[in-house]
Amino acid sequence: MAILSLASSLPARRVASSLPASAATKSDFRAALRHLAGGVSVITTGRGEDRTGLTVTSLSSLSAEPPTVMFGLNLASSSFPVLARHRSFGVNFLSSAQKQVADRFAGRGGEKGPARYADAEWSEGPSGAPLLQGALATLDCELEELIERHSHAIVIGRVREVRLGSNDAALLYWRGDYERLGWMAEEAATALGLRSA
């Protein structure tokens, strides 16, 4: 006997908010989100002189079958038109040793476009997207959909290739600063007595 879910038989619909528009202020919202720890990833897109990227903590898996990820991208970002043109992107999960890469792609030093790729080694994924050497893992993605909402777009990408990298500590962002989760491979080997201190 088949059991049907009531939710799956109902048509999808948008739910209107019952809260007044002024209930959550921008500053309160940002203050609350500072308590949400997030893994730091760099999104790369474009080729040659028409390449750029950004640092995100909003990356999430959407589906395992097919492998799909999503993240939020500001419509005013310089990365938005490049991503829309090239229709592919790389996702680079950063290790705790890659804070400088995170800062550069966040624009903290004022670098833009191809200048953000300086002082790191890159390879090319099947889509042409730049992938960071030494990252914990990289994903080569084909742009599947851009859904514009308010000031941002929800970017949905189909993962075409996965490359697993180092087994080092992960770079996290929490309360406005970088943190790390886990040990670097060298530290773990020393702690386990596999290497002398």
Image: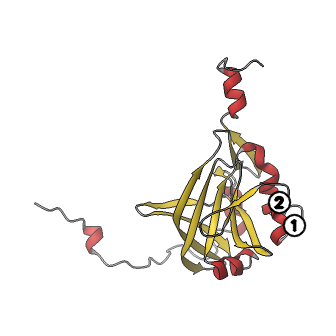
**Front-lying residue, 148 or 167:** 167
- Quarter of the image for the N terminus: give it: bottom left
Q: Mark 1 points at which residue?
A: 111
Q: Residue at x 68, y 39 (%)?
A: 169
Image spot of residue 153 (x, y percent)? 61, 76
For label 2, the crowd category at 10 Å Cα-Cα, with few meaning under 14, some 14 to 19 and many 20 or more, is: many
Q: Earlier in the sequence, mark 1 or mark 2?
A: 2
Q: Which residue is drawn at 71% across and 20% down?
A: 195
Image spot of residue 106 (x, y percent)? 79, 62
Q: Residue at x 77, y 48 (%)?
A: 98
Give the numbered dot on residue 62.
Answer: none
Q: In this view, does 28 lie to the left or right of 8?
A: right
Which secondary structure, mark 1?
A: loop
For label 1, the crowd category at 10 Å Cα-Cα, with few meaning under 14, some 14 to 19 and many 20 or more, is: some
Disc 1 marks a residue whose amino acid type is Glu
Give the numbered dot on residue 104.
Answer: 2
Q: Is residue 46 left or right of residue 87?
A: right
**Front-lying residue, 11 or 28:** 11
- Disc 1 to disc 2, C-alpha distance: 6 Å
**Front-lying residue, 179 or 124:** 124
Disc 2 marks a residue whose amino acid type is Arg
Please, which colouring scheme is shown? secondary structure
**Front-lying residue, 178 or 134:** 134
Q: Which residue is drawn at 77% across and 73% down?
A: 48
Which secondary structure, mark 2?
A: helix
Image spot of residue 110 (x, y percent)? 89, 66
Q: Tell me whether the residue at label 1 lies in contact with that at label 2, contact meaning CB atoms closer than 8 angstroms.
A: yes
- Residue positioned most to the left: 1
